[in-house]
Image: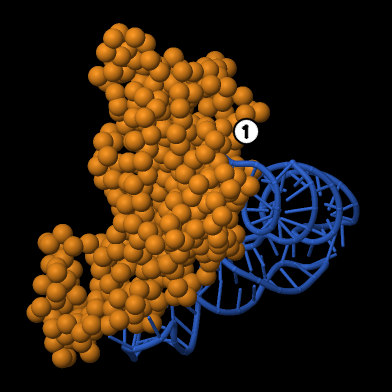
RNA sequence: CGGGGCGUAGCAUAAUGGUAGUGUGCUUGAUUUGGGAUCAAGUGGCCCGGGUUCGAUUCCCGGCGCCCCGACCA
């Protein structure tokens, strides 16, 4: 990508209506823009990062047998009435609207009911189970108070997987598999070391659930960490501490954290309410056991910014960075510099290496500041000074380490 | 949903009952090019509706929007 053609520009100052680090930096860097409170647009840089997060999630979901689908946002009232969740005293953050003929519809805040309903067409025999559909899709929740940038919005992206199993045992086994897959996802996202499997309330679904909580001072939740086992307990169930074997009589350390994922054993509540059953080997009607597994990719993106940013800007882990290399041409009007930078850029393009090429004719300081703000992992500086001794330099955004590399060797060096 | 605050140019801010100034951005030119460089000339603004007033960006009422604290968060 050629930076002078990128329609987003960086900003020196943060907008006054944002306080959270993630929103300030993402807006200043041109990754996102605010549409209204709790609602954000993803711009080219932001979408690239979001897509990388989604790719990792997809790969891990596919690895445990997931099959991607894409469901509707508009939801039929009747399906939700069967489980009582249309009722505003049970679910108070619905966005509801009406068709022209007056029929009420909802904008999905989750998809247990419609998917269980849909599955009636695909599940009839024990041979059809288990199955694990998932989607990455927008959700709407009418939060009373949106806040913290991408961390808590009214419209947001969610990866939601649902499991449909023959028995409770089969469901629990898949649940464990999903739990491991989630661990891998956060590992790959670079959040592994600070993300804890956290015992939490099951909400209206079940007694308990598991959350994946990433430690950050700006998190909304408080968790109590048991460091030996690297697990935690959400404050909301702290009073249950002595009833849960893993936490009994253990020393727990409180920390602020943000919930980046949540998995539930749902039992048969939603399948039964939709009338979803299967016939076993003996032709006997049986209940379908369900689970659901959520991750908010946008919230993950915000969390990564919160956790890794430094005073100069964003620091993307390589796995989710919008580009791997930032080619910064100093004095871009200089012919030699421009030719050299373009050559490197084209070689990278040809090799399928993602780079952002800063070809703008701007002062060096401005270019460095922008580069720091955008947070691409490796910066390649092309300048008259470097060309003079036949080298280029690569700066690591995270560590600040600078490596001089002979320019002929640069592509090889990059590829390793 | 309770409490508090705010709305002036693309962004950030100042002053003012007599139509608004600064920084930054953007445009043009010149000089620059290893940490947001210098100079010059331009560009561009009072959230909406009503009231008070000779006159409202300013005061009052209403609306809309935004932020913070708390509650909520399936």
> Which x, y percent locates residue A264?
45, 37
Taking A123 as reference, is A415 above or below it? below
Q: Residue A307's image quarter?
A: bottom left
Which residue is drawn at the image coordinates 37% and 59% (left, top)?
A: A192
Left or right relative to A124: residue B19? right
Residue for badge 1: A92
Asked whether residue A120 is in view, the answer is yes
Taking A278 as reference, is A314 above or below it? below
- The chain letter under disc 1 is A
Q: Nearer the viewer, residue A194 or A284?
A: A284
Taking A77 as reference, is A223 above or below it? below
Which residue is drawn at the image coordinates 36% and 30% (left, top)?
A: A169
Q: The blue chain is which one?
A: B
Q: Which chain is orange?
A: A
Q: What element carries label 1?
A: loop
Taking A84 as reference, is A205 above or below it? below
């Amino acid at each position: 990508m050629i930076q002078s053609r990128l329609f987003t520009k960086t900003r020196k100052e943060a907008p006054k209506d944002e306080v959270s680090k993630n929103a300030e930096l993402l807006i200043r860097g041109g990754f996102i823009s605010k549409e209204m409170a709790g609602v954000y647009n993803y711009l080219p840089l932001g979408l690239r990062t979001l897509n990388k997060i989604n790719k990792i999630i997809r790969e891990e979901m596919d690895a445990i047998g997931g099959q991607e689908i894409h469901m509707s946002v508009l939801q039929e009232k009747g399906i939700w009435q069967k489980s009582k969740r249309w009722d505003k005293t049970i679910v108070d953050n619905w966005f509801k609207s009406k068709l022209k003929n007056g029929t009420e519809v909802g904008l999905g805040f989750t998809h247990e009911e419609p998917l269980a309903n849909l599955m009636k067409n695909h599940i009839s025999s024990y041979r059809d189970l288990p199955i694990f559909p998932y989607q990455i899709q927008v959700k709407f929740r009418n939060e009373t108070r949106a806040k913290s940038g991408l961390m808590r919005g009214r419209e947001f992206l969610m990866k939601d997987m649902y499991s449909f199993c023959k028995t409770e045992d089969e469901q629990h086994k898949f649940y464990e598999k999903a739990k491991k897959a989630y661990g891998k996802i956060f590992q790959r996202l670079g959040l592994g070391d600070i993300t804890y499997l956290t015992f939490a309330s099951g909400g209206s679904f079940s007694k308990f659930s598991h959350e994946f909580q990433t430690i950050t001072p700006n998190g909304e939740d408080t968790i109590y960490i048991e460091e030996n086992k690297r697990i935690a307990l959400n404050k909301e169930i702290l009073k249950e501490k002595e009833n849960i074997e893993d936490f009994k009589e253990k020393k727990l350390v409180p920390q602020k954290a943000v919930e980046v994922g949540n998995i539930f054993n749902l039992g048969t509540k939603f399948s039964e309410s939709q009338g979803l059953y299967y016939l076993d080997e003996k032709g006997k009607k049986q209940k379908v056991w369900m689970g659901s597994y959520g991750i908010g990719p946008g919230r993950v993106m915000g969390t990564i910014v919160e956790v890794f940013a430094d005073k100069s800007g964003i620091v993307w882990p390589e796995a989710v960075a919008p580009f791997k290399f930032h080619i910064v041409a100093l004095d871009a009007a200089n012919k030699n510099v421009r030719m050299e930078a373009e050559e490197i850029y084209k070689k990278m393009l040809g090799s399928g290496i993602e780079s952002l090429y800063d070809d703008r004719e701007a002062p060096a300081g401005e270019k460095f500041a922008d580069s720091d703000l955008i947070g691409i992992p490796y910066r390649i500086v092309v300048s008259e000074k470097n060309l003079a001794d036949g080298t280029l330099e690569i700066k690591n955004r995270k560590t600040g380490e600078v490596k001089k590399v002979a320019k002929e060797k640069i592509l090889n060096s990059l590829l390793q």
